[in-house]
């Protein structure tokens, strides 16, 4: 089996993140690899564009502060150093790919809901990360 030296786990900061991260931690231990984590905040302006005629910056700042706190707490329980915690604005798939290249990750770990039917057609973050990744991607089944 090839070895992994730097694993990047993508977390949406829901309760399911722990399931995904546990798998990433097991691989970190098995390969004595470095472990980084990332949470991507989707800008409200991207999601809602000009649909809401109000200044969203205060809400956006609150979302960022909350995410920063949760990511920090989450990462510290897993002994992930501050330097390996990444909070980024943008589209999850795009930013996860860019960060993986930037830090030289050779494995990305994401959660996957194993959708069926219409939800499958609409796609998922796991699917988006798999397509276009330049390293291995492990999709951990969650929420079943
Ligand atoms: P979803 O496609 O939203 O069901 O998410 C599946 C998995 O994609 C999650 O378990 C995470 O691994 C990853 N993911 C989803 N949203 C984000 C996000 N905003 N930042 C980082 N990873 C995410």
Image (cartoon, grey):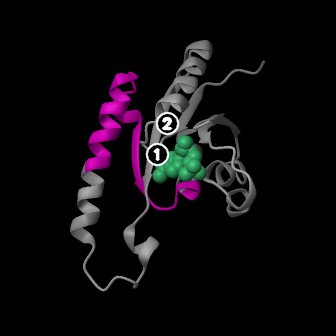
* Residue 90 in magenta stretch: yes
Residue at left offset 30%, top offset 45%:
68
Determine which quarter of the picture holds residue 100.
Answer: top right
Residue at left offset 64%, top offset 54%:
124
Pick the residue in front: 114 or 70: 114
Q: Position of residue 136 (x, y in %)?
A: 71, 37
User: Is the residue marked 1 within 8 Å of ligand 1, measured from its CB?
Assistant: yes
Q: Can you tell which of label 1 and label 2 is closer to the viewer?
A: 2
Do callouts 1 and 2 mark residues in contact (Cβ within 8 Å)?
A: yes
Q: Which mark is residue 12?
A: 1
Residue under label 2, please give it: 16
Q: Position of residue 107 (x, y in %)?
A: 64, 34
* Residue 143 in magenta stretch: no
In this picture, residue 23 sits left or right of residue 117: left
Pick the residue in front: 9 or 142: 142
Element on which disc 2 rests: loop
Q: Is residue 102 visible?
A: no
| Magenta range | 66-94
Quick one: label 2, few (<14), some, or many (20+) residues within 10 Å? some
Pick the residue in front: 115 or 131: 115
> Which image quarter holds the N terminus?
top right
């Amino acid at each position: 089996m090839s070895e992994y030296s730097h694993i990047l786990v993508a977390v949406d900061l829901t309760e399911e993140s722990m399931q995904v991260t546990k798998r990433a931690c097991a691989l970190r231990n098995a390969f004595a690899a470095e472990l980084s984590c990332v949470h991507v905040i989707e800008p409200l302006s991207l999601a809602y564009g000009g649909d809401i005629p109000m200044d969203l910056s205060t809400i956006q700042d609150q979302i960022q502060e909350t995410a920063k706190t949760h990511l920090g707490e989450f990462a510290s329980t897993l002994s992930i150093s501050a330097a390996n915690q990444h909070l980024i604005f943008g589209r999850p798939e795009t930013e996860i790919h860019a960060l993986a290249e930037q830090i030289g990750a050779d494995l990305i770990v994401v959660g996957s809901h194993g959708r069926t039917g219409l939800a499958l057609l609409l796609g998922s973050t796991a699917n988006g990360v798999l397509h276009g990744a330049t390293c291995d991607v492990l999709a951990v089944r969650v929420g079943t």
